[in-house]
Amino acid sequence: MNKRELVARVARSTGLEKKTVRSGLEAILSTVRENLRAGGKVKLVGFGTFRTACRKPRPAINLQTMEKVILPERRVVTFSPGSTLKQTLNHR
């Protein structure tokens, strides 16, 4: 599902206009991005938690030149699913 499909589905289930849903979704995503950029975490009870982690520098190989390189340290986003989401996925 992409963003357009998500907006359409939420609009259909809530009766709101797509424009309103899209605006709300953009505001939510913007807030999540800014909070993660500032080093915070976003916890959605029952769904999961988004947080950032620091990846240490590590060796790698450029497959085109076979040259050894060091990938620099970088921040990445991690997601830990909540218990309700886990149960939903594993319910048979």
Image (spheres, rainbow, N blue to C red):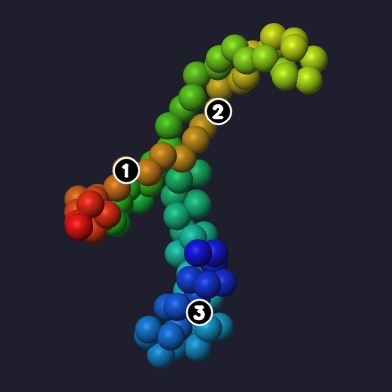
User: Residue 6 placed where, x, y %?
Assistant: 48, 71
Q: Which mark is residue 8?
A: 3
Q: Is residue 45 visible?
A: no
69 w.r.t. 91: above or below: above
Query: Would you call the spot at circle 2 few (<14 residues within 10 Å), some (14-19), or many (20 or more)?
Result: few
Q: Which mark is residue 66?
A: none
Query: Would you call the spot at circle 1 few (<14 residues within 10 Å), some (14-19), or many (20 or more)?
Result: few
Q: Nearer the viewer, mark 1 or mark 2?
A: 1
Residue at label 2? 74
Could you tell which of marks 1 and 2 lies nearer the N-terminus?
Answer: 2
21 w.r.t. 74: above or below: below
Quarter of the figure that contains the C terminus: bottom left
Is 64 on the left-hand or right-hand side of 2? right
Label 3 element class: helix
User: Residue 45 placed where, x, y %?
Assistant: 23, 56
Could you tell which of marks 2 and 3 lies nearer the N-terminus?
Answer: 3
Residue at left offset 72%, top offset 19%: 63
User: Residue 53 placed where, x, y %?
Assistant: 43, 32
User: Label 1 vs label 2: CA separation?
Assistant: 19 Å
Label 2 element class: strand
Residue at left offset 54%, top offset 67%: 3
Q: Quadrant of residue 14?
A: bottom left
User: Label 2 vs label 3: CA separation?
Assistant: 35 Å
Task: Tell me the amino acid under the disc marked 1.
Answer: Ser
Label 1 element class: strand
Task: Tell me the amino acid under the disc marked 3.
Answer: Ala
Task: Tell me the amino acid under the disc marked 2.
Answer: Arg
Residue at label 1? 80
Q: Nearer the viewer, mark 2 or mark 3?
A: 3
